[in-house]
């Protein structure tokens, strides 16, 4: 748990350079809690439901960005759907449109070893 918390904090510091108390158009707002709620889990599932070949499981909700809609950033465990596949971790960026639909903006590799040395 301590290692996970270290990683989540490091991700938030790296991923978001503009912190604000209220959403600013175009600026990222770090999440007050990295825990996955029912609401952001439903958002994640809606955005990733059409992805095939890799199973993504949200681990932490990192923050949002107000645009014409909202961008969201999640840390997710990714596992290729084949026997004995090893999991990896990704930053999954989703775009929630004003009409409520959700799409994947990008999925970026994430290397734990680059952030925390033990």
Image: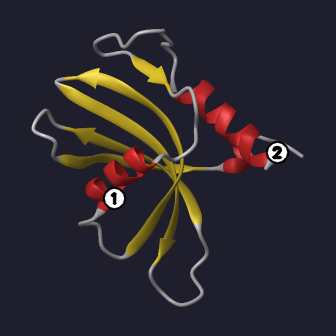
> Which residue corresponds to mark 2?
2
Residue farthest to the front, as pictured: 38
Residue farthest to the bottom, as pictured: 83
Residue 115 in view of the camera: no
Q: Is residue 72 toward the left or the right of residue 30 in the image?
A: left
**Earlier sequence position, callout 1 versus callout 2:** 2
Q: Are marks 1 and 2 in contact (CB under 8 Å)?
A: no
The image shows residue 4 at horizontal and vertical percentages of 73, 47
The image shows residue 6 at horizontal and vertical percentages of 75, 38
Residue farthest to the left, as pictured: 99
Q: Is residue 67 above or below residue 20?
A: below
> Which residue corresponds to mark 1?
45
**Res 53 → quadrant:** bottom left
Kind of element beneath mark 1: helix
Q: Is residue 75 toward the left or the right of residue 112 in the image?
A: left
Kind of element beneath mark 2: helix
Q: Is residue 26 above or below residue 71?
A: above
């Amino acid at each position: 748990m301590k290692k996970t918390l270290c990683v989540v904090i490091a991700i938030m510091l790296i991923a978001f350079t503009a912190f604000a108390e209220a959403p600013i158009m175009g600026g990222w707002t770090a999440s007050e809690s990295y825990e996955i709620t029912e609401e952001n889990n439903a958002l994640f599932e809606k955005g990733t439901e059409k992805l095939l070949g890799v199973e993504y499981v949200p681990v932490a909700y990192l923050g949002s960005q107000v645009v014409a809609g909202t961008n969201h950033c999640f840390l997710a465990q990714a596992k290729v759907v084949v026997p004995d596949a090893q999991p990896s971790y990704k930053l999954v960026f989703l775009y929630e449109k004003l009409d409520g639909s959700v799409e994947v903006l990008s999925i970026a590799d994430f290397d734990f070893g680059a952030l925390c040395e033990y």
